[in-house]
Image (tube, rainbow, N blue to C red):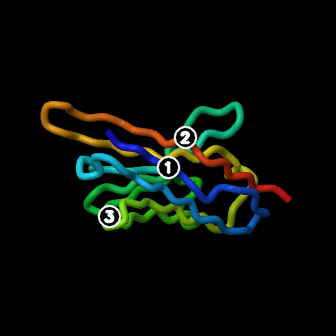
Amino acid sequence: QVQLVESGGGLVQPGGSLRLSCAASGSTFSINAMGWYRQAPGKERELVAVITSGGSTNYADSVKGRFTISRDNAKNTMYLQMNILKPEDTAVYYCNAHTFMIGAGAMDYWGKGTLVTVAS
């Protein structure tokens, strides 16, 4: 199993920056991809950014050029650098890990989320 703990959320003004962190523990060797998702009030959860074990990244169109996802495998930590934040970025941000192990197959794990509020 994998445990995920997010941190770094909070209140920030429009145009500001924030960096989220996700610390992974447990069977981290089985993780082949990690990502950030977010869920705004009254909206469905959506993909923000993903990064594979090989370092390949992908972003939602709404955050391209503003957000950067990265991983430090030695520290088992994933980051989301968020710049030029907009009110529409307000949401609960969730850390996700996708794993695969022979015998167990593919599984998804989630953190409890961290709230990001962008407002004046």
Q: Secondary structure at mark 1?
A: strand
Depth check: give the residue in front, 57 or 72.
72
**What residue is shown with label 2?**
112
Q: Amino acid at mark 3?
A: Asn
The single residue placed furthest to the front in the displayed view is: 26
Depth check: give the residue in front, 77 or 106.
77
Q: Amino acid at mark 2?
A: Lys
- Label ID, residue 118: none
In the image: residue 39, left or right of residue 59 = right
Labels 3, 1: front one: 1
Question: Label 3 neighbourhood size at 10 Å, few (<14), some (14-19), many (20+)?
Answer: few
Residue 100's quadrant in the figure?
top left
Q: Position of residue 40 (x, y in %)?
A: 67, 40
- Which residue is depicted at the point 24% across and 47% down? 30
Q: CA distance from mark 3 to mark 1?
A: 15 Å
Q: Earlier in the sequence, mark 3 or mark 1?
A: 1
Q: Secondary structure at mark 3?
A: helix
Quarter that holds the N terminus: top left
Question: Label 2 neighbourhood size at 10 Å, few (<14), some (14-19), many (20+)?
Answer: few
Quarter that holds the C terminus: bottom right
Above or below for 45 versus 12? above
Q: Amino acid at mark 1?
A: Val
**What residue is shown with label 1?**
5
- Label ID, residue 73: 3
Q: Position of residue 33 (x, y in %)?
A: 32, 50
Above or below for 92 versus 79? above
Above or below for 30 versus 44? below
In the image: residue 78, left or right of residue 83 = left
